[in-house]
Image (cartoon, rainbow, N blue to C red):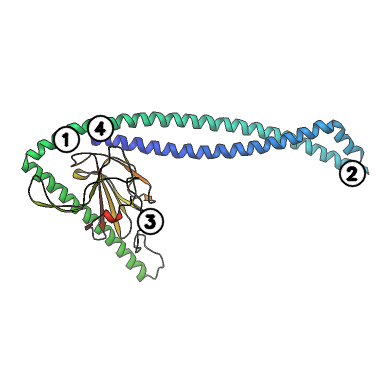
Amino acid sequence: MRGTSDTLTDLNSKISDLDTQVKKIEKEIAQSETSLQDQNELLKKRVRALYINGNEGYLNILLSSQSLTDFLGRIDSVVKIMEYDKNLIASIETQKKSLELQKSDIEKKKKETIALKQQASGKLKEIQDTTDEKKTIMAELVKDKTAYERAIKEEEDQSKTIASMIYQIQKRKEEAKKKQNSSGSNTVVTGNSSSIGKLYNVTGKPTYMTSPYGWRVHPVLGTKKLHAGMDLGVGIGTPIYALADGEVIYSGWMSGYGNVIMIDHGILTSVYAHNSSLVGKAGQKLKGGQLISYSGNTGLSSGPHLHFEVRKENGETIDPKPYYVK
């Protein structure tokens, strides 16, 4: 399933790149059409003037010369006018050919996009087809208490790994900031603002919370366990968006968390787990509300949903509900 998810991630990345190229070409076509229209209007005016005046227009210009010098100057002007008309026609023909090539290119890229979307749809169906099988496996796992405890322990260990990762990143930022301050630099270290800025809906629409953040008695183990985030009930393949502006510090597979992406917003870090595929890449700077992944059922998950966490600079989890904008 992980291999299928990786393929789907690659396909979504290619689709995103093609969409960007199509938008760029569409903009260029619009500019070319405007330029061509202006050139055509100018040519119409020149043709209309030639039709009204004919060759007599040029003849009158020459015959009205006051001297030989004036006559020669007017001949040069007439030649330049005729050369301008010739260049104008050539320019229009060149722009027409360029516009045809642009339109041909955009049609080709649109067909490529359609083909990739069909492939992505097929891969998504593969993931969806495994959901029932996975639920059966999870049911069997629940029956095996020892195995389930092991899986829960692994997930808890990974949660600690995430906390350590965030803490180390923030520690390096603080050290860099102290070093800059001691050297008298005025450069501001990114990620140390007092606010993470405008918040965006991570699912793009109001979504029902299937499980809140906090301590709860585990239904199988009978012990208290911390649910480190909130679960949002979304189907496989639902677009997931960045909570706020930030930088991707991790994007990849993390066993119990499945396909997970983590975004550093400065004083807080947001975590999105169990995705079917990932769009955001490590080191990428994102804007709030930007597409980062597609939801799924990967890792230790009993059904399709988004597991959403918010963590402090030291890596500790906090209730993400106040940051979930509906």
Along the viewing direction, whichever of 232 and 60 lies nearer the viewer: 232
Q: Quick one: label 4 or label 1, which is nearer the N terminus?
A: 4
Answer with left or right where residue 25 lies relative to residue 124.
right
Q: Residues within 10 Å of mark 3 (few under 14, many from 20)?
A: few
- Residue 6 position in % (x across, y down): 28, 37
At x 29% / y 32%, what residue is drawn? Answer: 124
At x 28% / y 60%, what residue is drawn? Answer: 170
What's the amino acid at mark 3?
Lys
Q: Which mark is residue 70?
A: 2
Q: Which mark is residue 312?
A: none
Q: Which mark is residue 198?
A: 3
Along the viewing direction, whichever of 148 and 224 lies nearer the viewer: 224
Residue corresponding to mark 4: 128
Q: Quick one: label 2 or label 1, which is nearer the N terminus?
A: 2
Q: Residues within 10 Å of mark 2 (few under 14, many from 20)?
A: few
Query: Alpha-carbon distance for marks 4 and 2?
Result: 84 Å
Kindly state the secondary structure of the residue where label 2 is placed.
helix
Q: Quick one: label 4 or label 2, which is nearer the N terminus?
A: 2
Q: Which mark is residue 135?
A: 1
What's the amino acid at mark 1?
Lys
Q: Quick one: label 4 or label 3, which is nearer the N terminus?
A: 4
At x 32% / y 68%, what residue is drawn? Answer: 178
Viewer-side label of 2, 3:
3
Along the viewing direction, whichever of 189 and 258 lies nearer the viewer: 258
